[in-house]
């Protein structure tokens, strides 16, 4: 059973190899597209992060490439014996008749290795069609007179051999669809679609996906502590919690309030509460938020000073498009000056600026 913030079963749809080759003007083949490192990265990352079940699926649109994209690197580069020593149990999902005969036989032998201590259940999906499989199993249950109940169907769909429901689906390559991969198991899964192409996938991508899963589930628990997502006590998106925003406004220091009140993330970083209050739609590390906020404040200062500089130049009768190393400010005036447009009186103040407009150097240190 997966913990609320750690997925127990992760499916990775390994998409993007064809695009990777096309961008480089290469043929799509095992000689030109390096997929070994990505496969090793995802298995190592699952072991490091403590994921119990990992299912790897070649893109269903390119099922004929399953052998060299998944099975051959798994057996040759990673090695079934080495994986077994690491506690990885390999098994197959789908129809392996499309694989070369020797490759299919090696995959079967890899799955027959004794269990030993199992740290990761690695399922290799080859020739898998989730919709057809679901339809065939329903027909089989009806033909046997057992009825297509939820429990019976789940046991039929790999439930008896221990393949649990999917908690997280990661698809690389920029495509935002499941392509009928394990439709029954993925019904309640979190979906994360990455623009990274499969040959460029690293352990860091996997770790970041787990971090996002962690944040989504924790926010779900905060909004629905009873686990009832649709009942009478469930929160509604049309009535968000505005308390964090109101607190920021009253505090007059949203960045300081965010840093002081931030909550710990999965890797110890702080999460800005004012961004997590409304449905948990956006979360940013405080370091990023403070940097963005600092840039925003700097730009506001630049804009205000530029506007005051233009007003001072107008009051002094200087042309607005005249270049100057030093722009006059209200403090440069001999005394109070009345703006003829609005009637406001400007008092002298010692303020200068070293830039004639926003976007240029203002003399302040950078972020």
Image (cartoon, grey):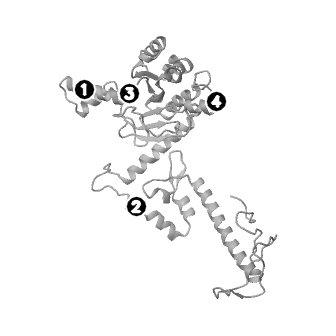
Is there a contact, CB below 8 Å, between mark 3 and mark 2?
no
Task: State the image coordinates of residue 235 (x, y, percent, origin top left).
Answer: 34, 57
| Residue visible at 29% across and 28% down in the picture | 135
Query: In front of the other: label 4 or label 2?
Result: 4
Q: In this rendering, would 361 be left or right of 214?
A: right
Q: In this rendering, would 68 be left or right of 279?
A: right
Q: Which residue is mark 3?
A: 129
Quadrant of residue 330 within the rendered picture: bottom right
91 to 277, vertically: above or below: above
In this rendering, the count of numbered labels is: 4
Task: State the image coordinates of residue 27 (x, y, percent, origin top left).
Answer: 60, 25
| Residue visible at 64% across and 31% down in the picture | 24
Is there a contact, CB below 8 Å, between mark 3 and mark 1?
no
Is there a contact, CB below 8 Å, between mark 3 and mark 4?
no
Is there a contact, CB below 8 Å, between mark 4 and mark 2?
no
Quadrant of residue 124 within the rendered picture: top left
Real-space Cα separation, disc 3 to disc 4, in angstroms: 31 Å
Q: Residue 113: in sight, yes or no?
A: no
Mark 2: few/some/many CA within 10 Å (<14, 14-19, 20+): few
363 to 263, vertically: above or below: below
Query: In front of the other: label 1 or label 4?
Result: 4
Label disc, if present, on residue 25 of the rendered structure: 4
Real-space Cα separation, disc 3 to disc 2, in angstroms: 41 Å
- Secondary element at tag 2: loop
Q: Which residue is mark 2?
A: 240
- Secondary element at tag 1: helix
| Residue visible at 38% across and 50% down in the picture | 221
Mark toward the start of the polypeptide (3 vs 4): 4
Real-space Cα separation, disc 4 to disc 2, in angstroms: 49 Å
Query: In front of the other: label 3 or label 2?
Result: 3
Mark 4: few/some/many CA within 10 Å (<14, 14-19, 20+): few
Label disc, if present, on residue 139 of the rendered structure: 1
């Amino acid at each position: 059973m997966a913990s609320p913030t750690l997925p127990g079963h992760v499916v990775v749809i390994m998409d993007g190899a064809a695009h990777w080759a096309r961008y480089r003007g290469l043929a799509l083949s095992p000689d030109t597209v390096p997929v070994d490192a990505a496969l090793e990265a995802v298995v190592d990352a699952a072991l490091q992060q403590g994921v119990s079940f990992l299912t790897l699926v070649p893109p269903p649109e390119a099922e004929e490439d399953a052998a060299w994209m998944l099975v051959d690197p798994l057996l040759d580069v990673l090695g079934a014996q080495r994986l077994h020593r690491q506690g990885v149990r390999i098994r197959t999902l789908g129809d392996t008749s499309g694989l070369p005969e020797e490759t299919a036989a090696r995959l079967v032998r890899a799955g027959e290795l004794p269990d030993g201590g199992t740290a990761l259940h690695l399922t290799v999906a080859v020739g898998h069609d989730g919709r057809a499989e679901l339809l065939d199993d329903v027909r089989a249950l009806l033909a046997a007179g057992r009825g297509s109940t939820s429990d019976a169907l789940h046991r039929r769909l790999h439930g008896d051999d221990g393949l649990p429901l999917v908690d997280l689906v990661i698809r690389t390559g920029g495509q935002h669809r499941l392509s009928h991969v394990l439709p029954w198991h993925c019904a309640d899964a979190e979906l994360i679609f990455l623009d990274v192409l499969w040959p460029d996938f690293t352990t860091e991508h996997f770790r970041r996906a787990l971090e996002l899963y962690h944040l989504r589930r924790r926010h779900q628990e905060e909004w629905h502590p009873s686990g009832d997502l649709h009942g009478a006590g469930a929160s509604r998106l049309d009535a968000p919690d505005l308390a964090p925003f109101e607190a920021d406004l009253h505090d007059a220091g949203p960045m300081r309030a965010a840093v002081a009140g931030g909550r710990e993330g999965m890797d110890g970083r702080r999460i800005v509460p004012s961004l997590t209050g409304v449905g948990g739609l956006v979360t940013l590390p405080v370091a990023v938020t403070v940097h963005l906020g600092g840039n925003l404040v700097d730009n506001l200062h630049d804009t205000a000073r530029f506007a005051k500089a233009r007003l001072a130049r107008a009051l002094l009768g200087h042309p607005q498009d005249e270049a100057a190393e030093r722009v006059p400010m209200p403090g440069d005036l001999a005394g109070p000056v009345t703006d003829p447009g609005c009637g406001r009186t400007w008092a002298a103040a010692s303020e200068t600026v070293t830039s004639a407009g926003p976007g240029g150097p203002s003399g302040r240190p950078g972020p």
